[in-house]
């Protein structure tokens, strides 16, 4: 029904409809963002880790915090999984959540702000105090009709921050990203610029003596972004650094679910950039190992351009590839796998539509020095198939179940 409505309603009317819902949601719940310090994080990758890390920094320094991420909803000590299959809730739900946070006497709200959420005005009538930009790589190009539109959608968070009536507004920008200048162009009075390679970055790992327990350069960037937010809230630097050092990561992000006789990692990576970082990080830390990957292409009907790109990366870094179903929605899953396979030339490939069987196959192929990497879903609780039907799912749980069948001893 939604697809039919979108097809026949003019775009300007659809935009007005989304705007109207955002306005009504804010009115019904009495503009709750005015009573909270709102920190939004946007970018292609890293948003979830950054949100969780910011929340931890704020919580462990005595603040009452609510947060929204692709993984969970949290208000103070109460948390529950995000089962919406959307990172940023709809306009009524998000305003109600803010009001619930106010009722719970929270003083901070930390959330992921997505390009799709912005496109549907879910960020409107939210008075932001701070905006974080992590990075920008190709994603949702078909939905936004090109990379520039995708970038501008992300920029609308900073435009909203610029218009916000809050005092002490701040922005946090990854200076190493090629699109940093665009996000700096909004000229937020208080800026925090971080990076690893750019000499103009004010916040670098060396300058602040950053130590983290999480693997990968991408997690160093995530930690720097969260550090900047802590700094903006006048938290003592040694406290921020101690909290970052102790942070153990989040479910479904480079999560080691099996340790012996071989390692099995589960990760959410669903863009070429994120996938390559996962493969490179594992291979650099586990030298001499071979990768066996379980790979799909998330979101049937979306971002078809990236499918062969994902195949090329698996071809480059993995010794064995098992292509499988992910979230096909109404698209033919066999066609999706064929698109991914078109980027693979040399590596050994198995195509197994049943994701459980695919994971089982990867585990059966693995030898002592091998590493199995299951990507695309992380800890998502559902797999979505034709007709929008949701199948209960968890890559981590399935991997452990199939492992226990094969290695009962």
Image (cartoon, rainbow, N blue to C red):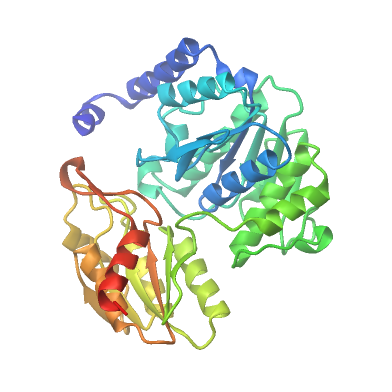
Q: Position of residue 238 (x, y in %)?
A: 82, 51
Q: Position of residue 208 (x, y in %)?
A: 81, 57
Could you say which is closer to the camera, residue 195 or residue 239?
239
Q: Please name the residue shown 46% across and 55% down the image.
A: 138
Asked whether the viewer can see residue 216, the reply is yes
In the picture shown, does residue 35 fall above or below 70? Answer: above
Position of residue 288 in the picture relative to residue 338 (left or right): right
Position of residue 268 in the picture relative to residue 282 (left or right): left
Residue lying farthest front? 409
Q: Position of residue 237 (x, y in %)?
A: 82, 49
Q: Quadrant of the N terminus?
A: top left
Q: Position of residue 322 (x, y in %)?
A: 28, 73
Position of residue 217 in the picture relative to residue 243 (left or right): left
Residue 177 occupies quadrant: bottom right
Could you say which is closer to the camera, residue 49 or residue 148?
49
In the picture shown, does residue 29 fall above or below 189? Answer: above
Q: Please name the residue shown 53% across and 11% down the image.
A: 30
Q: Please name the residue shown 33% across and 24% down the image.
A: 14
Could you say which is closer to the camera, residue 282 or residue 304?
282
Asked whether the viewer can see residue 296, the reply is no
Q: Please name the residue shown 36% across and 19% down the image.
A: 17
């Amino acid at each position: 029904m939604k697809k039919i409505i979108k097809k026949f309603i003019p775009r300007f009317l659809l935009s007005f409809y989304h705007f109207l819902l955002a306005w009504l949601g804010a009115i019904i719940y009495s503009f709750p963002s005015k009573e909270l310090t709102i920190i939004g994080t946007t970018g292609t990758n890293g948003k979830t880790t950054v949100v969780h890390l910011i929340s931890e920094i704020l919580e462990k320094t005595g603040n009452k915090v609510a947060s929204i991420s692709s993984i969970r909803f949290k208000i103070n000590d109460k948390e529950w999984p995000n089962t919406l299959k959307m990172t940023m809730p709809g306009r009524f739900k998000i305003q109600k959540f803010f009001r619930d946070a106010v009722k719970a006497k929270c003083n901070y709200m930390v959330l992921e702000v997505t390009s799709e959420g912005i496109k549907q005005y879910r960020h409107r009538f939210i008075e932001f105090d701070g905006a974080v930009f992590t990075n920008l790589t190709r994603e949702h190009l078909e939905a936004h009709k090109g990379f520039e539109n995708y970038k501008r959608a992300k920029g609308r968070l900073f435009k909203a921050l610029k218009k916000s009536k809050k005092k002490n507004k701040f922005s946090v920008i990854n200076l190493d990203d090629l699109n940093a200048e665009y996000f700096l162009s909004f000229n937020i009075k208080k800026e925090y610029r971080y990076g690893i390679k750019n000499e103009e970055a004010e916040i670098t790992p060396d300058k602040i003596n950053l130590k983290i327990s999480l693997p990968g350069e991408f997690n160093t960037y995530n930690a720097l972004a969260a550090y900047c937010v802590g700094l903006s809230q006048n938290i003592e630097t040694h406290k921020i650094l101690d909290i970052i050092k102790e942070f153990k990561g989040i479910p479904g992000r480079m999560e080691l679910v099996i340790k012996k006789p071989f390692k099995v990692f589960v990760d959410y990576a669903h863009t070429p950039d994120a996938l390559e970082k996962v493969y490179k990080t594992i291979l650099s830390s586990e030298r001499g190992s071979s990768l066996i990957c379980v790979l799909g292409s998330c979101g049937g009907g979306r971002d078809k351009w990236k499918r062969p790109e994902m195949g090329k990366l698996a071809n480059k870094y993995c010794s064995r590839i098992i292509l499988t179903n992910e979230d096909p929605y109404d698209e033919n899953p066999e066609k999706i796998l064929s698109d991914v396979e078109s980027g693979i030339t040399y590596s050994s490939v198995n195509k197994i539509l049943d994701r459980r069987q695919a994971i089982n196959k990867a585990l059966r192929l693995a030898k002592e020095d091998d590493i199995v990497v299951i990507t695309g879903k992380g800890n998502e609780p559902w797999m979505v198939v034709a007709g929008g039907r949701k199948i209960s799912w968890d890559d981590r749980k399935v991997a452990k179940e199939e492992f226990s069948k094969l290695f009962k001893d």
